């Protein structure tokens, strides 16, 4: 799919014969072993040595695994952290920088080194890479999103391994994805991946913090509601930015979009891709949504808020109604027609996100008025919906 406005096409029927476990029950992990297109994300903590330099041996080990899978016919998209970490050593910095300017400088130095190393290691297997640097702005603007889709699809068709990173050299705090885990989840849907593999420094999700005595790995999660009571930490390692909280949010995005996900140690990459019992396997939670709706729900930065009355909030939550001017009590923010906005219930709860059909400057004169009255006074065009139901996604808090 190369258009954000298109619905996803039918998936291949029966991608692979299901593996059987000891009881003859199809293994959930067989979808990983048989995946034809896989997004793999590796974090900074898995690519950085104790001295703050890029761990070339660790990077080479991951490349070897991915090259073998690529040779077997699987299309690989690699989302990699490590640009800032790769720049720490060459710049003589003792630790990961905390101020934005130094982080950008480290990323600028590190991005070239990181890409060069990936190119060298993949080239040893006769594989070409293509580097793609993204910022959140590339997903906020739909034209950029479509461009990213087209570029990735063409690279994959040419047998290239796209290597994606957030463009930390130019990004600012308000434009960041927040973590490359979330970026990987969005990319997995963007390219219609069959599976997502999150490689990190812990062997999956545990029923308690892994450092706690007696903590046990959770091998399979069919529904994220099952782990609502599991204690997780928000902070990652000293060189990474994402802890288990961000990883589970990424899992929610991916599995909710129909992409099964495995979270495990970088050293378990080969076993995870083979469908072995390592890390935690998160089953897909439902059918694939259109890329347009995923973009509205997770990738787009909202530009404003529309406050709804009780009736409008109930209608929106019902999932079948568009938002009309009569149900809006107040508009906040500066936005243009086509921008994403939040829809807010009277109690202040964000109930949905959607694409607004009017500029912010046009809305005040329309609020609280019926479409009939608007048509009679202002003419055709002002009686249209403010957010069409096809451009609206309900907000679903993380479990």
Image (cartoon, rainbow, N blue to C red):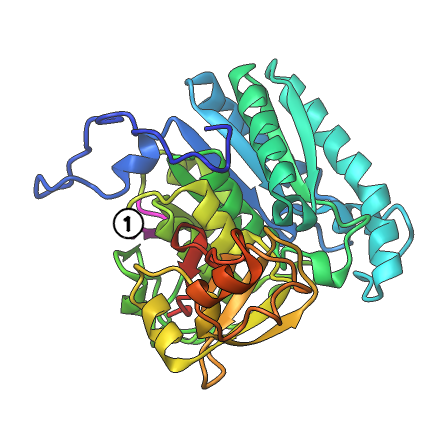
Q: Looking at the rendering, in which quadrant would you find the C terminus? A: bottom left
Q: Residue at x 25, y 56 (%)?
A: 222
Q: Where is residue 147 in the image (x, y as percent from the top left)?
A: 62, 31
Residue ID for mark 1? 286
Q: Position of residue 329 (x, y in %)?
A: 52, 79
Give the residue furthest to the left: 23
Q: What stretch is highlighted in magenta?
A: 277-285
- Indicate the secondary structure of the residue bearing disc 1: loop
Q: Can residue 62 be seen in this view?
A: no
- Between 351 and 289, the residue placed more toward the observer is 351
Q: Which residue is drawn at 50% across and 67% down?
A: 245
Q: Neighbour class for label 1 at 10 Å: few (<14), some, many (≥20)?
A: few
Q: Can residue 318 be seen in this view?
A: yes
Taking the image as shown, residue 116 lies to the left or right of residue 233, namely: right
Magenta run includes residue 190: no
Q: Looking at the rendering, in which quadrant would you find the N terminus? A: top left
Q: Residue at x 69, y 30 (%)?
A: 131
Q: Is residue 139 above or below residue 227?
A: above
- Between 313 and 219, the residue placed more toward the observer is 313
């Amino acid at each position: 799919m190369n258009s954000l406005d298109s619905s996803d096409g039918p998936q291949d029927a029966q991608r692979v014969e299901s593996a059987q476990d000891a009881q003859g029950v199809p293994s959930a992990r067989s979808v990983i072993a048989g995946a034809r297109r896989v997004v793999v994300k590796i974090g900074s903590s898995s690519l950085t040595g104790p001295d703050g330099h890029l761990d070339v041996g660790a990077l080479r080990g991951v490349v070897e695994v991915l090259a073998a899978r690529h040779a077997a016919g699987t299309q690989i998209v690699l989302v990699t952290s490590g640009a800032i970490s790769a720049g720490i050593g060459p710049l003589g910095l003792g630790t990961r920088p905390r101020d934005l300017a130094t982080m950008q400088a480290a990323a600028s130095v590190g991005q070239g080194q990181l890409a060069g190393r990936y190119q060298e290691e993949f080239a040893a297997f006769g594989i070409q890479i293509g580097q793609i640097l993204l910022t959140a702005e590339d997903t906020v603007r739909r034209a950029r999103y479509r461009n990213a889709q087209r570029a990735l699809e063409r690279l994959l068709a040419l047998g290239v391994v796209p290597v994606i990173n957030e463009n930390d050299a130019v990004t600012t705090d308000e434009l960041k994805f927040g973590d490359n885990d979330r970026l990987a989840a969005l990319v997995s849907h963007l390219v219609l991946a069959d599976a997502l593999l999150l490689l990190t420094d812990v062997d999956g999700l545990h029923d308690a913090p892994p450092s706690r005595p007696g903590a046990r790995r959770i091998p399979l999660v069919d529904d994220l509601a099952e782990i609502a009571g599991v204690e997780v930490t928000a902070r990652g390692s000293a060189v990474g930015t994402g802890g288990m909280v961000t990883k589970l949010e990424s899992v929610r995005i991916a599995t909710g979009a129909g992409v099964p996900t495995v979270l495990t140690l970088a050293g378990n990459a080969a076993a995870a891709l083979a469908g072995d019992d390592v890390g935690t396997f998160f089953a897909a939670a439902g059918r694939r949504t259109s890329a347009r709706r995923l973009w509205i729900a997770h990738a787009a930065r909202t530009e404003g808020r529309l406050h709804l009355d009780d009736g409008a909030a109930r209608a929106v939550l019902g999932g079948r109604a568009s938002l009309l001017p009569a149900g809006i009590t107040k508009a906040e923010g500066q936005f243009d027609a086509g921008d994403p906005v939040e829809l807010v219930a009277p109690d202040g709860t964000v109930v949905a996100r959607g694409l607004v059909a009017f500029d912010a400057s046009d809305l005040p004169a329309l609020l609280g008025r019926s479409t009939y009255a608007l048509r009679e006074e202002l003419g055709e065009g002002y009686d249209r919906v403010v957010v069409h139901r096809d451009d609206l996604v309900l907000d679903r808090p993380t479990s």
